[in-house]
Amino acid sequence: MAKKVLIITETGTNIGLGHLSRCFGLYEALEAVGAVPEIILKLDGAFEISFEDKNIKVLDWWEENNINRIDNSGYGAVVLDSYNATPGIYEYMMGADFPVFFDDMGSRYEKGTVINGAVKAETLDYPQRGNVSYLLGTKYLCLRKVFWDIADKKNKKDVGNILVALGGGDPRGITRIVLEAISENFPTISKNIVLGKGSAGYDVEKYVTGKDKVFQSLSGTAMKRLEENADICICGMGQTLYECACVGTGAISIAMSDNQRYDVDRWRDVGFMEYAGMWSDGDLTEKLI
C-alpha cells in the first residue's frame, strides 16, 4: 500500500509563494516514487493561486484546534514548511511517526528530519542529535517537476529582456521601484513582470509599455518559460532565484525579508548572483543600476 504523506504549509499576501512552491516540488517528487501526498494550506489574505491539480485542502491550521482535528498517525510522514508555526503546532508534529521540517534559519528541533536545500546549507552549524537527521545543501532543494530536466542555455552578451519577479506577495511595493528604475535608465529593454494576485500597492501601470507583459498566477511551466527566455532576472532570494540558477539565467537579487540576508555571502561564494541590497536600503535604486 502506498504511503500517505501530509504536507502542512502556508501562502498569502505577506508570505509569498516560496513555501508552497517548494512543497509542490516535494509533492511531485513523492508522487514520482509512488507515495500519496496531500497538502494542508493556510491561505493568508485575498490571494489567488493555481493548485495545479494537486490534492490541497485550505485550512486555517495556524489555529491549533483545527490542525489537532487531523489524525497524523495515518501518515508515513508529516512535513511542515512554515515561519509561523506555534509551539502547539510543533507539539502536533512531535506526535507524528516521522516528522519532517523545511528549515531556512538553522533552527533547532527535538526529533525528526530537517531539510535545508539552500546553497551551502551543509556549512551551517546545526546541533548534532541522535534523533535528528539533516538533509542539507542544494542536492536536497525541492524544485517543481518542470525544472528536473533542463537544457543547456547560451546566454547573450547584450540584455534585451528582463524578468521582474519579486515574489507572490510584495506588500512593500518593491516591484514598482524596480520598474521605475528600469524604465528611466533602460527604456529600450522589454520587461516581463510577474505579480501575485491579491498583493497590495503594486501601482505599476505607468511603467508598463507596449513591449512589456504582465503575468499573474502562473503555473510552474509558464514560470519556467519566462525564466529560460529572460536575459536577466531581478528577483528576491527565494525559489525564483534557485529556479533561475537551475535554468542558467543570471540574477540580480534583492533581499525581500530579513532572513534572506543570511544567504547573501553563500550565493556570492558560488559566484552566481549580483546582490542589490535589502528592500529597505535607501540607495536600492542606485545599486540596481
Image (cartoon, helix red, strand yellow):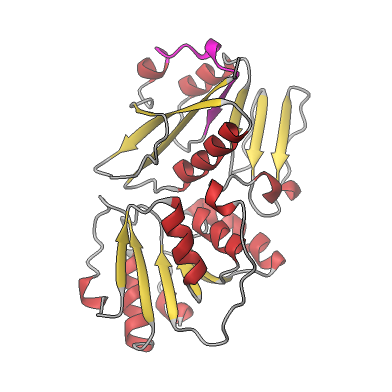
Q: Is residue 83 visible?
A: yes
Left or right, 154 with reference to 126 = left
Q: Quadrant of residue 113?
A: top right
Q: Is residue 37 above or below residue 214?
A: above
| Residue 14 position within the rendered picture, expressed as x and y whole percent measured from the top left | 34, 47
Q: Quadrant of the C terminus?
A: bottom left
- Magenta-span inclusion, residue 257: no
Measuring 63% from the left and 50% from the top, which residue is drawn there?
A: 118
Q: Quadrant of residue 140?
A: top right
Measuring 62% from the left and 37% from the top, which residue is drawn there?
A: 107
Measuring 31% from the left and 62% from the top, which residue is drawn there?
A: 215
Q: Quadrant of the N terminus?
A: top right
Looking at the rendering, the stretch of residues picked out in magenta corresponds to 68-80
- Magenta-span inclusion, residue 71: yes
Q: Is residue 235 visible?
A: no
Q: Is residue 19 above or below residue 287?
A: above
In the foreground, 54 or 120: 54
Q: Is residue 196 above or below residue 64?
A: below
| Residue 250 position within the rendered picture, expressed as x and y whole percent measured from the top left | 57, 72
| Residue 4 position within the rendered picture, expressed as x and y whole percent measured from the top left | 55, 20
In the foreground, 103 or 59: 59
Left or right, 265 with reference to 7 = right
